[in-house]
Amino acid sequence: MTFTSDWLENLGDARDDAARAQSIFKLHESYTHFTRGYQMDAGKIIQDGLMPAGAAAGQIITIAPIPFYSLCEHHLLPFFGTAEITYTAGDHILGLGKFPKLVEALSARLNLQEGLTAAVYDALHENLRPKNLSVSLEARHLCLDMRQGGITGTLLKTVKNA
Amino acid sequence: MTFTSDWLENLGDARDDAARAQSIFKLHESYTHFTRGYQMDAGKIIQDGLMPAGAAAGQIITIAPIPFYSLCEHHLLPFFGTAEITYTAGDHILGLGKFPKLVEALSARLNLQEGLTAAVYDALHENLRPKNLSVSLEARHLCLDMRQGGITGTLLKTVKNA
Amino acid sequence: MTFTSDWLENLGDARDDAARAQSIFKLHESYTHFTRGYQMDAGKIIQDGLMPAGAAAGQIITIAPIPFYSLCEHHLLPFFGTAEITYTAGDHILGLGKFPKLVEALSARLNLQEGLTAAVYDALHENLRPKNLSVSLEARHLCLDMRQGGITGTLLKTVKNA
Amino acid sequence: MTFTSDWLENLGDARDDAARAQSIFKLHESYTHFTRGYQMDAGKIIQDGLMPAGAAAGQIITIAPIPFYSLCEHHLLPFFGTAEITYTAGDHILGLGKFPKLVEALSARLNLQEGLTAAVYDALHENLRPKNLSVSLEARHLCLDMRQGGITGTLLKTVKNA
Amino acid sequence: MTFTSDWLENLGDARDDAARAQSIFKLHESYTHFTRGYQMDAGKIIQDGLMPAGAAAGQIITIAPIPFYSLCEHHLLPFFGTAEITYTAGDHILGLGKFPKLVEALSARLNLQEGLTAAVYDALHENLRPKNLSVSLEARHLCLDMRQGGITGTLLKTVKNA
Amino acid sequence: MTFTSDWLENLGDARDDAARAQSIFKLHESYTHFTRGYQMDAGKIIQDGLMPAGAAAGQIITIAPIPFYSLCEHHLLPFFGTAEITYTAGDHILGLGKFPKLVEALSARLNLQEGLTAAVYDALHENLRPKNLSVSLEARHLCLDMRQGGITGTLLKTVKNA
Amino acid sequence: MTFTSDWLENLGDARDDAARAQSIFKLHESYTHFTRGYQMDAGKIIQDGLMPAGAAAGQIITIAPIPFYSLCEHHLLPFFGTAEITYTAGDHILGLGKFPKLVEALSARLNLQEGLTAAVYDALHENLRPKNLSVSLEARHLCLDMRQGGITGTLLKTVKNA
Amino acid sequence: MTFTSDWLENLGDARDDAARAQSIFKLHESYTHFTRGYQMDAGKIIQDGLMPAGAAAGQIITIAPIPFYSLCEHHLLPFFGTAEITYTAGDHILGLGKFPKLVEALSARLNLQEGLTAAVYDALHENLRPKNLSVSLEARHLCLDMRQGGITGTLLKTVKNA
Amino acid sequence: MTFTSDWLENLGDARDDAARAQSIFKLHESYTHFTRGYQMDAGKIIQDGLMPAGAAAGQIITIAPIPFYSLCEHHLLPFFGTAEITYTAGDHILGLGKFPKLVEALSARLNLQEGLTAAVYDALHENLRPKNLSVSLEARHLCLDMRQGGITGTLLKTVKNA
Amino acid sequence: MTFTSDWLENLGDARDDAARAQSIFKLHESYTHFTRGYQMDAGKIIQDGLMPAGAAAGQIITIAPIPFYSLCEHHLLPFFGTAEITYTAGDHILGLGKFPKLVEALSARLNLQEGLTAAVYDALHENLRPKNLSVSLEARHLCLDMRQGGITGTLLKTVKNA
């Protein structure tokens, strides 16, 4: 099963072959970009940004909102929204710039939102080892929105904490 | 160039072949759905809903917001937002339910937003023949949002009137 | 074609005959209430509330929002929203309490919104004889909302002025 | 007791017989549409969308707002609003697209809001078997709004959880 | 001590006797209307709307906002605002339309807000017998607002629950 | 026609005679307060606050919102809201503190809102002699609100300018 | 150390002696007004407004926002904001109109906000004897705002409860 | 006429002489600070920040909001709010940092708001020589607020343009 | 004049030499990044994205908000905000993705905001040749904010159109 | 490694040497200003503002928002936002004006936000000795914002309490 110029023409696209081929090329490029996270190592991102907690030990630290885009692994359609990460510092804190990188590394893949939430949680749990940790994601899913008529405004919110 | 299970595996998707094939199947279904407008006749939608203006002649009539989803013809990625249609009634008015249908028929195709704006305008101009007409669309484009980091919030607004 | 207990049972309503008959009775009562405006005389409502303009002559007077409920004459389903009436006082002004009464008398009928807008405008134009007059209505139509999936949020706005 | 052209004429509708008959026909069509949920199997919708929880086990998952339209079983008039569903994943999670379907299947029937709330709760409780579950609905009832003068803004909120 | 035409003239009203008498007549009519609740039986309103709880048993049910107008028994001046009623269903639930009726029956009297709150609470407690019950009212009092200069914005909120 | 203790008892007030008499006494006090404006001289208020415009000549000066309370001369019930006054300074400006005083002097009387608007306008026009002047009032009328069920939210806005 | 015409001239005020003297006179008048609370008896205000709680016993009663103006006893500059008072009724309730009077009596003095909070609390605690009591004040202090550049927006909130 | 410790004691301040003297000392310090603008040269501030317009010629440039504090020259009480300055660049533009300095230099004096507006306008008109210029100030006056009961929320807006 | 470890130590930074040197290194990296626009060719960005206007000719097209960051050429401190670009299509339209690129290319340099506004305008004017064009920027300048105490909230808005 | 005119020229700055040198001079001045807190003694600021708690003992006192600007010690780039301080008064309270001074003294240095939070907390804990204390900071970091494309809106919130 393929995205071909013929297939687009069949759907009703009246542009010439070259235009259709060019669009399919760009679509491939886009999906390659949207899955760039597979080339990123979440654990290493955290390890590179660890600092001794020092005076920060015991502080409650929240980073939010962290915008993200991901692809629904069921429909290969985008879902996007924001993450919120809260932790109580143990022996280490993590440099601020690493949180968006971590979320990017794990969201720029094929995901269920529930799996993405767990992946962010687990990477932080194992590498940062905070006293408490909560990861919550809230997102709009085009596989839901575009296949229904109208606007549902329905968001999926997933929370993992301990 | 194709969306194949191999290609997904290459990008980094670690699921088994069946899961990947199933996702690609759903993606094809989705794109068929997103282009269902090619099977709809914008002119006929309007013609079927025309009513003599009667007491409505000369009234300024606005229908908004009309949500829509479309596919960017350059990247085959979704753009979505709302349309606002305002006209001054001439000899006819159009049944309220026809406006969302018209916008659906023309947006569920491959489009540039500028072209979609013109298509809605032209279909109404030719078939409804209002005294004045303004069509404006405001949308968020994933080809812009997902390829940049962060959130731009950038919207494209296009207006055609006369 | 009728609303009968059998018909409801056929649609899937599993309640007993008495419950279904009772509901149909209440529905008839409701529709009688929703069309009570036919028993009201818009012109007389205005005539009863006219007062010499005196110091008010030339003032720009706005009454808004005036909530209303009406029945779509195409689908016999409710549409509802608010009216805004603005006039420049000529020889007379109209008592504040008459505006909601006038809107009730004309909206509690079977209507197209465009026709309702004209009816309110015309009743005021003929009986109050203001220097300027603008009547605008903005409403949500269940015939549109309930027959589509999701929430469209689409409103119809109609304006008649001179 | 029936909705007939005569009955509408009696209420005050001055249109001709054909227009009135056409409207009654559309009203019947609408009510058939509003009760389409009787043809849908809530349990099966859930069963078809179950997935092993995997990494999602123990996560708190919220889907909201889910818009719905229903008919009040007392007055056969619409009530509409939004549902919010929150559960803690046990052995399974439910695909995102199934939640709006489930709510549609149960709301597109004759309902009391309290009964609809219980029906959504029970269907999820029995088929998804989550660790915790909360279902809450908030809606505007036309049987209340349209029978009073003015705008009450009154909403009914019902919550079932355990 | 009376509201007479002379008394109004004394205060400074320069209209003729007939106009003043007409206003006093309307004021009496208004106060008769504002105290119509004395002719309504709160207990009977509830008893007429009781339904077996069935699937609703144990649900948390909130009806709000319920607008009300009342007269301060100290100054005979209006106070007005909204009520919020929340109960956990025991053996019965109460039809939605009865809540505004109940609030009207008890507020369209001479009241202290604290007494009105208790009256609504007690009527529900005795007749509906819910598992839990909370009644809260929030209102603006003209006896406070109009006797001070400026705008205070001060609201009185009263809550009775158990 | 009088507000007597008997009359209140007749309406349904179950308090003893003394309590009812006390309330009627307070009501009379209140109405005397609400009509205190008859003892105030609008023209003198302005004359006392005039200052040569100097550097302010030609400036556009707006004072808003100015809260006010008044009594509807038809129903003797309160209406209240805010005034906005804008003028272009001619030879004089008016001290800021005089504007609320002026509005108080003219609103603490029996009024139609249209008449009150004109009275504020005329007092400023004659005594301040600005180059341009606009007076607009927006108010909620209890004679409208309390006699209808529910909440209409309807406001009356009146504008006089030249 | 004095506010004299010479002193103002020294600061840079170029007006004539009479204008400067007049301003200093008005400033003295203002400060006399701002400290009028010293002539008011907080305890007596409460005692005059006590009523047996009756049906209000055990209700949670909140009066807010209550605007106030005070003078900072350190800098003699204004601070102003709103008070919120919540109590659970014991044997007595307090008439609504007494709360703003009480706050006025204690705020129209030289105060630290912390001391003013305690004074309001103590006066109610001793004279109203509620079951629970919470007094909170939130205010903007000109001694802070005007001595810094820019706008800080900093508010001081003080809460005393038991 | 003076602010003395005796005078404060007379008003009702029960603190000891030293505390009262200290407060009066701080009040004098504050007023010296509030009139620091007399030591600043508005013209020089602008001259020091002029730059050739270059590519900016003909641009419409707005700087807002610029917060300011001033003393009312009638009551010596604070008024404060924000300024908005818009100009069309002629031969020169003015460095951004100079606008708040200019507003500070002219507002930290004794002023009527109308005079302050003119002073800012004139300084820019003479020294920057823009093609168009508009200066508008919006402020809250404590001489108005604190001398009335309640909260008026009244703002004074003054605009000078050409 | 240099940013050296000694200089930081002098200012008060108590970290060791290595930490200070590392920070200075990162600061240099940052400034290199902030001036990356010098390596980008604004004209070429537009030329690469031109498309024949076709049906878009005469449409009014707005792209906003486009976030940007720049360095103030006077203080080398950041200023940042959003741009809004509106044009009426002539013979060509510009691909949506080019607008943020264009703004990035010109803002990631040392700029006065007025100069940046002109640069964006001129690049579009020369290369896109629209019928009408308006470029407006609104930004917060740290050279203003950080050097004053408190928060001014002052924004600079610059508009160039024709 | 230095900020030299050559280095700026290398980056692409086309201005002449004098302009570049002038900018670097201003940048040095700015950084000296941004680190002025090293010359301020946080403990002494608190000690100077202590007052016996008196009637304030046991009150919950909140000062917020307190705006601050700081420099990230990793990148030497600004971060800025607001602090909120809440304490329960023990034997002493702290004068309102000292809180912004304290925050300024500690933020006008090189900081990690976590370290700054601890520093404010510790200074208050040691010198004010409150019964409870909570310090929370919320800020936007340019090292994060300016190095990513687009706008992330990401804030870091840090809380230390006990």
Image (cartoon, coloured by chain):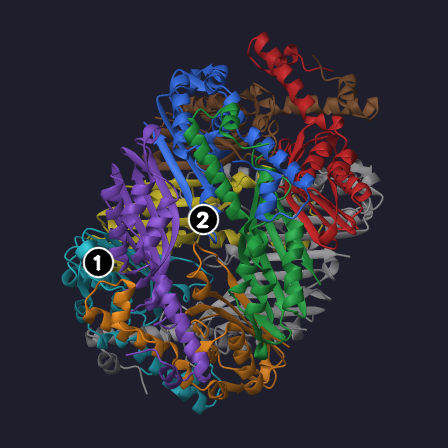
Chain colours: A green, B blue, C brown, D red, F yellow, H cyan, I purple, J orange
Query: Which chain is home to disc 1?
Result: F
- Residue D51 in the image, given as x and y percentages of width and height: 74, 44
Which disc is residue D103 wearing?
none
- Residue A58 in the image, given as x and y percentages of width and height: 63, 75
Residue C71 sits above or below residue H113 on the image: above
The answer for how far apart the CA atoms under marks 1 and 2 are is: 44 Å
Mark 1 belongs to which amino acid?
A: Ala
Q: Quadrant of the N terminus of chain D?
A: top right
Q: Which residue in the structure is indicated by mark 1?
A: F56
Query: As drawn, is H65 to the left or to the right of C109?
Result: left
Q: Quadrant of residue F116?
A: top left
Q: Tell me if residue J111 can be seen.
A: yes
Residue at image point 49% right, 29% down: A5
Callouts 1 and 2 close, C-beta under 8 Å: no
Q: Residues within 10 Å of mark 2 (few under 14, many from 20)?
A: some
Q: Tell me if residue C128 can be seen.
A: no
- Residue H159 in the image, given as x and y percentages of width and height: 26, 55
Residue A133 sits above or below residue H57 on the image: below
Please tell me whether mark 1 sits on a helix, a strand or a loop: helix
Query: Which chain is home to disc 2?
Result: B
Mark 2 belongs to which amino acid?
A: Gly
Query: As drawn, is C7 to the left or to the right of B45?
Result: right
Give the number of the mark in front: 1 or 2: 2
Residue C51 sits above or below residue F42 on the image: above
Please tell me whether mark 2 sits on a helix, a strand or a loop: loop
Q: Which residue in the structure is indicated by mark 2?
A: B153
